[in-house]
Image (spheres, rainbow, N blue to C red):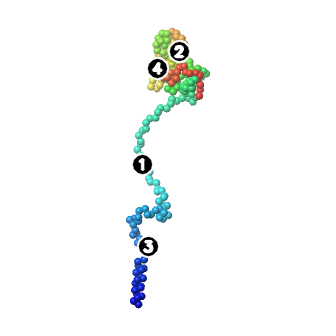
Amino acid sequence: MLILAGLLVIAGAGVATGAKLITGADVKDASLTGRDIRDGSIGTRDLAPKLRSALTRSGKAGPRGATGAQGATGPQGPAGAAATGGVSVRDGNGVHLGGIVNVSLNYFTVVTSTGHVISLMPNGHSYDQQIYWTGPSCTGTPYLASFSPTANPVVAGYVVYSPIAGGLLAPADPDANGQAPSVSFTGASYGIGTCAANVGSGDGYRMRAVTPASVGLPAYPVAAPLTLH
């Protein structure tokens, strides 16, 4: 009987020291914390499917924020090109002269890149304009006749050709609105191709000599033939 009791004690000791698998049933609820879990040891595959799905869903949009302050005004953009008609004119060298604003039997009126207006024939010339002069032999100040003290003003960019003046003329007295008024003058001579005496008073627009470049033309006469595009 003593021998049997000793065997039972030895067998009991063997069971107490043997390996045992720890399961969730052996862990007290809420006893484990983040400190008990090694960093990086748990991945998304270890999480429950519902938790993985929740992590990938976008949250609801938050409330709209307040309107921000207005930004500073940007720099002014470059000036646009001068307005032209739907059809343009090119000279014999292919240079763009401007857009068409009027067409007649043997000439067309062009608005150049500088905003000047001139009537040109296909041969590159403008028709000769009669000019009145304050001095004898077509000298002094040139005037383009308006024939009325109440005549409408002429646009400041209006350009004519005078063979006696030997070139192009434009209004000398444009106002802030880009127009030149008709004024009274005392003339001594006038002419188109030749000069003649003509003493007396009249009404017209005081003119001044201008260069082709200043009115948007490459030269005068313009290289022929002029063509429409």
Question: Mark 1 — residue?
Answer: 66
Residue 163 tag number: 2
Q: Which amino acid does label 2 sit on?
A: Pro
Callout 4 crowding tier (Cα within 10 Å): few <14, some 14–19, many ≥20: some
In depth, the one of 19 and 86 nearer the eye is: 19
Query: Which badge, 1 or 4, comes first in the chain's sequence?
Result: 1
Q: Residue furthest right?
A: 105
Query: Which badge, 2 or 1, comes first in the chain's sequence?
Result: 1
Tell me if label 1 and label 4 are in contact, CB under 8 Å.
Answer: no
In depth, the one of 167 and 154 nearer the eye is: 167
Query: Which badge, 4 or 2, comes first in the chain's sequence?
Result: 2
Residue sitting at x 49%, y 26%: 114
Task: Quote the CA–CA distance across marks 4 and 2.
Answer: 18 Å
Q: Which amino acid does label 4 sit on?
A: Ala
Tell me if label 4 and label 2 are in contact, CB under 8 Å.
Answer: no
Query: Which badge, 3 or 4, comes first in the chain's sequence?
Result: 3
Q: Is mark 1 on a helix, strand or loop?
A: loop
Q: Position of residue 151 (x, y in %)?
A: 50, 20
Residue 22 tag number: 3
Residue sitting at x 40%, y 72%: 28
Residue 172 tag number: 4
Residue 126 tag number: none
